[in-house]
Image (tube, coloured by chain):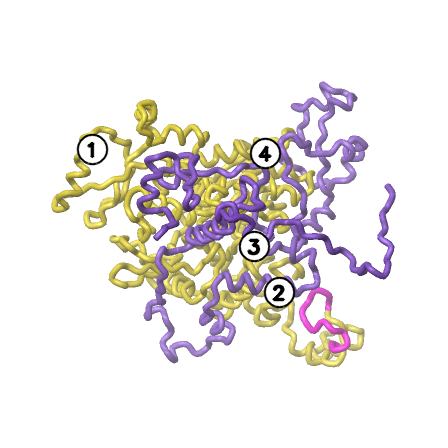
Amino acid sequence: MPGIEVLPNSASITAPGWAYVPDNGFDPSKTALQPSGARKRAARTTGLAAGDTTARQQSATLKHLLELDKDNHRDVQIPVPARFKDKSGARVKTTPNVRRILTSQKTFANHLADEEAALATQEQPALSQTPRPPAPTPLRNASVGRRSSTVAREPSAAGEGQPVTVTLHAPVEKSGRYGSEDVGGSNPLLRSYIPQIPSAAAMEALLAGPPLSYNAARSAPSIGKPPRHFCEICGYWGSVRCLKCGARVCGLDCKNAHDEGRCLKFYG
Amino acid sequence: MSRSRAEQADARLVSGYLIRPSGGPGPSNPLRCTLDCRIYLESMPRRSAVHEKNLPDRTLVVDNGAYTIKAGFSSSSPTLKDCHTIPNCLARERDRKVWVGSEIESIRDFGEVAFRRPVEKGYLVNWESEKAIWDSTFLTQKSKLHCDPHDTNIILTEAPNTTAALQTNCDQVVFEEYEFASYSRHVGPSLNAYHDIQTLFGEPPRASHLPAVPAECLLVIDSGFSHSTVTPLYKGRPIQQAFRRLDVGGKLLTNYLKELLSIRHYNLMNEEQLVNDAKEKISFVSASFGQDLERTRKGMSKKGREAQANEADVVVDYVLPDYNAGVHGYMRPHDPSLAAKVKKMGAMANPGGVVEDFMTLGNERFAVPELLFNPADVGMKEAGLPEAVLQSLTGLPPGLWPAMLANIVVVGGNCLIDGFMERLETEIRQLSPTECVVRIAGLTDPIKATWLGGAYMAADPAALKAMQVTRHDYLEYGSGWLSRVFAGTITR
């Protein structure tokens, strides 16, 4: 394959890994400043595909998710009862560390921000930012082993690569069901391709990998699943959208109930 | 024949024992080491003496969950009866009285009870309140779990991907405040590897006299109160790069149900406990979501009403608890007759008599746990649990996929929801490669399963000794060293 090399000239800036490109993407901040049309609704949805949500809807969703994550609906401060607090002088040996930890008012969000800041300052972008490999979700019809890598594998060589102690409990190992030898024989089309078990050294390297950060371990959004909408009153499919606030309802009954109490947009 | 200790030290100096033995403690700079070597040798504890010191006999296994603490002492053959469940929260009643830990079980009126939980998003954050709960659980004389920390080993769990600062806080409190004799900290789900996994898949049980060996390849799905995690394990050791987390747990489900009920029936926004009970009793995971949604439609058309009458198994009445009479809430088949409606109206009209109030629940029953499989239904930009499993597999070499998919174990309170296991198995089966066999198993008590795994692990004294870090070592080498030991970057 021919390689493409950018020759440096006086106009280009030699910085590896990035380049200036024209920004054609949708920018909500610009839309807000320069409405493209007279109609408000048209302005709100400029540049959005059918499934996309507006900035207002996104912030409403985020707020809703935060609500769902709360321990109590109201904001309450529950102090530790006095009987569990140390009387003055009853304990003499509290170490500075413990005193600091017990009096700390940090929440998890604070700790998370600390961790993210620490990771950002580290000189390991591969570890801190996106340690997740960009491999796609294996689909149903994707073979476990790629043919190109396993066709060359000889039955005798398979035993050498793996350590003797590794005996997997998977019944896949008993390949009789898949008919690798009995049915297919030497026919490469009918052979079952079971990928090789990693060697002991590879397993050690895998186990020694550093833990992911909190955000990197979050599961990625699923691709290809269309969003589902439900009636916010009765929970049935929400096929009708409220023109004022964008909420979904299922029919006229629920639309009336929505208009009475839950429509977020009031015209005064 | 036998030389004095000073002579021995001199002999080591002369024979070039200037740089500390590899893996051991001490200054890492060899230059500095040569300078204060003599001091080092004299102040260093005799390592042989440290190793000869035996651990105490008592071992406390603590699975410090966000909703409950699962704790108990391990024995040579631990059972679920040894495990005690303590609510991990402070609760404040309407009259501003605050209850701590196991005292909460004595509350009778849960109306408007507010909770304070030291574990936030699965991670132990607030030690001020946690200390009150631990004190009442482990240090109070009348508690079943009372122990003297100086004479007890502790095995503690943490959630996957805990931040380093929180880990250090935990280590410091365990050793400096409670002063446990020895301590080890584990990623919670990894303890499940010590169960007899092969029995779950129909193999003969393992020999009872042999120590518990961790399962070779295991994929643990832990769906708890704060979140649901997927953790692949190899010989009991976590493969950190492949951990995945879905931020949907029991708390989010409860809050979602609370919201739905408040829109459709009564305002229950301040009734945490009531809605949580209701969720545990009514919810199920639908095998065919769209079909069930049609069945519960409250349409006014004749066809819709007929469908609702035919499918009485989905629509139920949930009778609200009566705290004054000490009656718990319960579920009963829906009574669509007019008499039931009139009775309810009458009960609301004259509140003097014995009132029985109920809510008729339809799609709330399965729309709530559906979030575990489709978090996008509330706008969460994450994939459901089956897809998270497959995403976790992408962090592993393909050679491990068959073994992982064939050994999936589900723990955590959410897998007690009806239909959860079947749906999970179906969806993982649909997503995974055709060549792989998918086997999913649940344990007898999924809530206490992690504790029991830890207790099996602690039952083997040799394994326990290899794992635990003594307080002496901690005081000697510090918390930085300890966190590196638990991270596996240095071996002792």
- Determine whether the residue tagged by mark 1 lies in a helix, strand or loop: helix
Choose mark 3 or mark 2, whichever is in front: 3
At label 3, counting other C-alpha atoms closer than 10 Å, the crowd grade (few under 14, some 14-19, many 20 or more) is: few
* Residue at numbered disc 2: A118
At label 1, counting other C-alpha atoms closer than 10 Å, the crowd grade (few under 14, some 14-19, many 20 or more) is: few
C-alpha span from label 3 to label 2: 39 Å
Residue farthest to the front, as pictured: A38
Amino acid type of the residue that numbered disc 2 sits on in the rendered structure: Ala
Q: Residue, x 22% and y 41% (percent of image)?
A: B357
Numbered range of the magenta stretch: B21-33
Q: Main secondary structure of the magenta part?
A: loop
Given residues B203 and B428, the one toward you in this image is B428
Can marks 3 and 2 be said to lie on one chain?
yes
- Relative vertical location of residue B261 with respect to residue B156 in this rendering, above or below: above
- Relative vertical location of residue B294 with respect to residue A111 in this rendering, above or below: above
Q: Chain of mark 4?
A: B
Amino acid type of the residue that numbered disc 3 sits on in the rendered structure: Gln
- Whether residues under marks 3 and 2 lie with C-beta atoms below 8 angstroms apart, the answer is no
The disc placed on residue B431 is 4
In the image, taking residue A30 as reference, residue A102 lies left or right, namely: left
Can marks 1 and 3 be said to lie on one chain?
no
- Whether residues under marks 1 and 3 lie with C-beta atoms below 8 angstroms apart, the answer is no
* Residue at numbered disc 3: A34
Given residues B325 and B23, the one toward you in this image is B325
C-alpha span from label 2 to label 4: 37 Å
C-alpha span from label 4 to label 3: 45 Å
Chain A drawn colour: purple
Q: Position of residue A216 (x, y in %)?
A: 60, 52
Chain B drawn colour: yellow
* Residue at numbered disc 1: B340
Q: Position of residue A109 (x, y in %)?
A: 50, 61
